[in-house]
Structures are given as structure tokens and as C-alpha cells.
Image: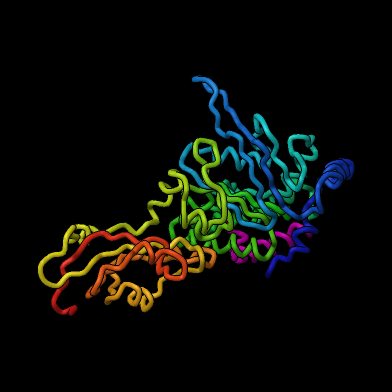
Amino acid sequence: MELSITARQSLAIPPADPAQRRAPQAALAESAPARGQGAVAFRAVGKTYQSSAGPVQALDAIDLDIAPGSIFGIIGRSGAGKSSLLRTINRLERPTEGQVLVDGVDIATLDDAQLVELRRRIGMIFQHFNLLAAKTVFENVALPLRVAGVPKAQIEARVRELLALVGLQDKAGTYPTRLSGGQKQRVGIARALATGPEILLCDEATSALDPETTQAILQLLRDINRKLGITVILITHEMSVIREIADRVLVLEQGRIAELGEVWKVFGNPAHAATRALLAPLQHGLPDDLQQSLLPDPPPGKHARVLQLGYRGADGLEPDFPRIAAALGGAVRLLHGGVDRIQGHAQGQLLIALQGAATKPDLEKLTQGLQAIAHDIKELGYVAEPEHLH
């Protein structure tokens, strides 16, 4: 069963008490665009914690906008301020300075009743699932609806719909201890969607999962984003997760914005040292056997020049081996490397052996304009070639 946008909006559950219900809805309606957009903005947001050693600044001058209906990634090393920033969106953390705006509303101005309404519009899933072990899958998903005073029949229909959405319709009566990690996270996602939120916060949602399960959860989050139009904001320390799912990414370093932009641009041409460090595990390094066989000068006998071709995703430039061979004036053999496609842009590095080039081509020219065969080309050295390759 597919959860429709209409159903999501109609089941954004108000408080049970009608007197409570009117105040937050009226206040938000006066100052915000039409409900259901899910836009988030930070304006000069700072956060300082007091510790025994003195004040610790976790966030400093954060200014950015998150578009409604997008998937936005926040990445950084441990202690960079990711969790602090995420938790300001539902006011689990109060900024020391600046403003956090949800659909144009400064959430610091909300009273307690309005804050309850805001948090029903913002779902959250966690690294360690936070399920109640003594309650079944059905009861865990139903909990926010029971707290909101939703009628029993409505709860039944809503929970069944959500379990179908996350692929757990046959696990309603199962207890969390009998579920795999991926299944527990699916329950967490269903529970987070119970009140029909416009924004879904993901706090290291895949860090406790194996790679295969991570892929399944990311696919589920992508499907939810596309089907329901929910804004998904996730924090992670894994660049592979950002590459897989996000539209835009913020790189945090010591509480400050190190880099911000479309994922393919940040991955293809990282400008900050923190970004390059986070991307390092995804790079195709030079294998040991090739490193050991590289020579600075041409060896006697048959040999080839080793070139590294880099692709950053810009200008539609992609590896084209016939064109590369023609431009370099010799036979080309792939030694190592890989190219990914991120948001339709080819990025990565290739190591090639250039055999039999009559002259030494001007590599700098081959990175420019219509002559370009790669965004950057480096000469790494020479390797001896086995006779059978000639």
C-alpha cells in the first residue's frame, strides 16, 4: 500500500483537546507559508555549551537554507557539531544565538503547545532505533498516535498503512528483540512518519547497519522522499551515504561551515581540507604492486607511460577511450581506477598505460576546452610492459 501525500497531510494529528488544538495551528498559519512545505533555514546560528573546563562552542555562524522536499546531508568528523545542528530543528537544542526557521517561523518564539505541534510535523529516526522492547512493532508505531489522542480505528488504519510502506506488514505482532537491525530501523521510520511529518530528521540512521542493510534503508528513505515529498535531513560521518542519497551537502568542521553545495560539486572538486579528508576512503588509491613497479624514467625494452586522468563531473566530460587514445597518439590500457555517477555527473580517476606514442603530447592542452579528455592529467612514471602486450 502506498502512502499518499493527501493521507499524510490529513493525518498530521492535532492534540486531543480542542482548546489546545486551535492555538498552535493558528499561530503557525499566521506566519508560515502553506503547511506541508518543510523548508528549514538557519540564520547566524551559534551554540555554546558550558563545561567544567569552560565554554565550548559547538556551532558558529551557521547560515543556510534547506529546500522543501529535498534530501539534505550534514557530514563532519566526530565533534564537528552535526548532532547539535540537527537537534536545533525540533528545538531539542536551543541555539545560543541566531534563528532556526521552519516554514518561515522562528521556532524559538513558539510556546509549549505550539512546540508540541511543531514536533508532530518533524519526525526523527535514530542510530540505535530507540524502540520499546516490551511493545510489539504495531504498538511502537502506534505510540505517537495514542499520545496524540487519535481514535483507535484511525490508529489501526494508519499503522497498517505505515507498516506496508516500510515492508513490515507481516511483523505487526513481533517484538523488537526478534527483528534484525534493518527491520528495527524500518519500525523507527514508520513510527517517525506516524503523525504525517513534513520533515524527517535522521541521526546517523545507518551507522549501526551492515552495508547491504544500509543500502536498503537508503532506498527506503529515497522512496519516502519521492512519494511523500518529505524533506529529509540526515547527519552522518560516511561520505558514501551522502553520495548515495543527498541532493545537497553541508560539511561541518569545528562547528563552522567548511563547504556547502550540490553533492556532485562538493565531491568532484572539494575545496576544504576537511572535505578531502572525509572523501579519502572513497578514493581509488594506487595499488601496491603498481606503486612498486613504477619507474621515474623509461626502462629498457617495451614500456608504457602511466597517466592519471581525473574527472570532476563538470561540463559533461566523461571517459571516452577511443578519443583518449586518439588525443594521446598511442594505444591505451586501463590499469586501475573507477568512475562513479553522482547526480548524473561522472567523477573519479583512471590510471592508464600509454603505449607506442610517437611524441609526448602536451597534457595541459588536453584538459582545456574542446580538446579536453579529462579535467586533470598527471604523469606518474613508467612501467615495463610484458612482451605479449605488443
Point 38% across, 66% down: residue: 366
Give how far across and how far down residue 274 sits, in percent. 45, 43
Q: Is residue 2 left or right of residue 24?
A: left
* In magenta segment, residue 159: yes
Give how far across and how far down residue 12 sits, in percent. 77, 53
Give how far across and how far down residue 302 sits, in percent. 14, 72
Which of 217 and 35 lies nearest the eye of the viewer?
35
Which of 137 and 101 lies nearest the eye of the viewer?
101
Count of marks overlaid on the render = 0
* In magenta segment, residue 38: no
Based on the displayed image, in which of its 4 quarters is residue 158 positioned?
bottom right
Which of 290 and 84 lies nearest the eye of the viewer?
290
Please tell me whether residue 347 is drawn above or below residue 12 in the rendered image.
below
Give how far across and how far down residue 123 sits, in percent. 67, 50
Point 11% across, 71% down: residue: 301
Q: Quadrant of the N terminus?
A: bottom right
Please tell me whether residue 322 is drawn above or below residue 198 in the rendered image.
below
For the magenta stretch, what is the residue range?
154-175
Mark yes or no: residue 133 visible.
Answer: no
Based on the displayed image, in which of its 4 quarters is residue 24 positioned?
top right
Please tell me whether residue 184 is drawn above or below residue 77 in the rendered image.
below
Which of 78 and 120 lies nearest the eye of the viewer?
78
Point 64% across, 36% down: residue: 45
Q: Quadrant of the C terminus?
A: bottom left
Point 67% across, 61% down: residue: 162
